[in-house]
Image (tube, helix red, strand yellow):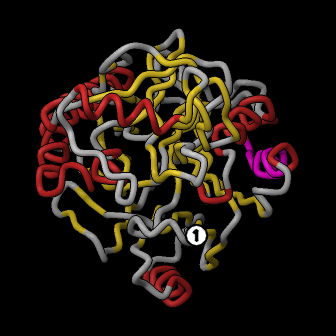
Amino acid sequence: MIVFASPQNDYAELLRALHSKCPARAMVGCSSAGEFTSETSGTGLTTVIALRAADMRFSASRTLGLSANRDSTARQLVQGFQGMGTSEYRYRTALILVDALAGHAEDFVDRLTIATGGMYRFVGGGAGDDGRFKETHVFFGTEAHTDAAVALEILSNKPIGIGARHGWTPAGDPLRVTQANNSCVLSLNVAPAVEAFEEHAAQSNQRFDRADPLPFFLHNVVGVKSDEGYKLRVPLGIDAEGGIICAAEVPTGVLANIMSTQAVDAADAAASATRDAMQQVQREGHTPKAALFFDCVATRLRLGQDFSHELDAVARELRDAPFAGFNSYGQIVRAEGQFSGFHNCTAVVCVFPE
């Protein structure tokens, strides 16, 4: 069982109740910032999806102290993987859920790849707390943890489809990140980073208020340029020196752009991600049975009621296959043919075969 629960819940009570009614062999999940299924969506909800397949093997693992040592915690999480010592299954996938507020999620995903020798595909996201950014939890059995990560290993001889798209495009000239400290961009083109956003706001006729920048940031995110495209980072605030505090790491020295998008682009991106995931299942002759869908809390906050269009787009592509998911603090993808790593504002779909 996979559980996504609003922070309005008493997690211990909720998890015990779920386990007593449906004693699953493995149960993982996390707190969320918006919950949805193919039938409903909103906040203050609990979403649960149960997986059962005779020809798949599931196992759950956890790791604690994420902020202290990503290398040892990644290796500890992987120690619970059953597929590391067997060649019985063609496909090795792991759902990864992290306390993103512990930081360094991108590095943690990289270290998981190293710890598994590149044999696993990863999909998942960062736990949420309804946009408060105070405290987030991951679930392992009936326990809720902070500063932790959990994994649901899925071993199968049928492919698990993974797709990721974001639908944002560069707006303006590239900017060099001349100084950054983890998730804070201190300077762009050797000037306080906030000045680039103020200049962009003036050029694009948008309102930018240093005292209340989030409404602007939700529509103007940072895109870190790479060979695969632009990896998105959501700005969350401004520090005293004019640095832009982002939701995930931005390396010093990279080229970046301020990015823009429209509501229809988000729905199109979600549909494309779903098609990519479905095709990975269908090209080996299998039928999609169910799916997980993750998207960013910033996307829900930016779109408001229009976020339903994105959910409708996923449902149309999946046809009869149900899905469940949550609005997360970052999305995780590590799969061939997809833009891998830790993302913001990116639609991620994982499709399970019949």
Identify the residue at the far top of this view: 227
- Mark 1 falls on what kind of element? loop
Q: Which residue was labeled with disc 1?
A: 137
Residue beneath the point at 49% across and 13% down: 228
Quarter of the image for residue 234 reads top left
Residue beneath the point at 34% across and 50% down: 298
Where does the image place residue 129, in percent across and percent down from the top left? Answer: 45, 69
Where does the image place residue 135, in percent across and percent down from the top left? Answer: 57, 72
Q: Is residue 181 visible?
A: yes
Q: Where's the C terminus, which quadrant?
A: top left
Where does the image place residue 247, in percent across and percent down from the top left? Answer: 52, 48
The front one of 20 and 166 is 166
Task: From the viewer's perspective, tell me whether residue 116 is left or right of residue 154.
Answer: right
Vertical position of residue 44 compared to residue 123: above or below: below
Residue 92 magenta-highlighted: no
Q: Is residue 55 visible?
A: no
Task: From the viewer's perspective, tell me whether residue 64 is left or right of residue 343.
Answer: right
Looking at the picture, which amino acid does disc 1 mark? Answer: His
Where does the image place residue 118, in percent across and percent down from the top left? Answer: 71, 24
Residue 78 magenta-highlighted: yes
Give the dominant element type of the magenta stretch: helix, strand or loop. helix
**For mark 1, does the 10 Å Cα neighbourhood hold few (<14), some (14 to 19), or many (20 or more) residues?**
many
Magenta stretch? 73-82
The front one of 66 and 313 is 66
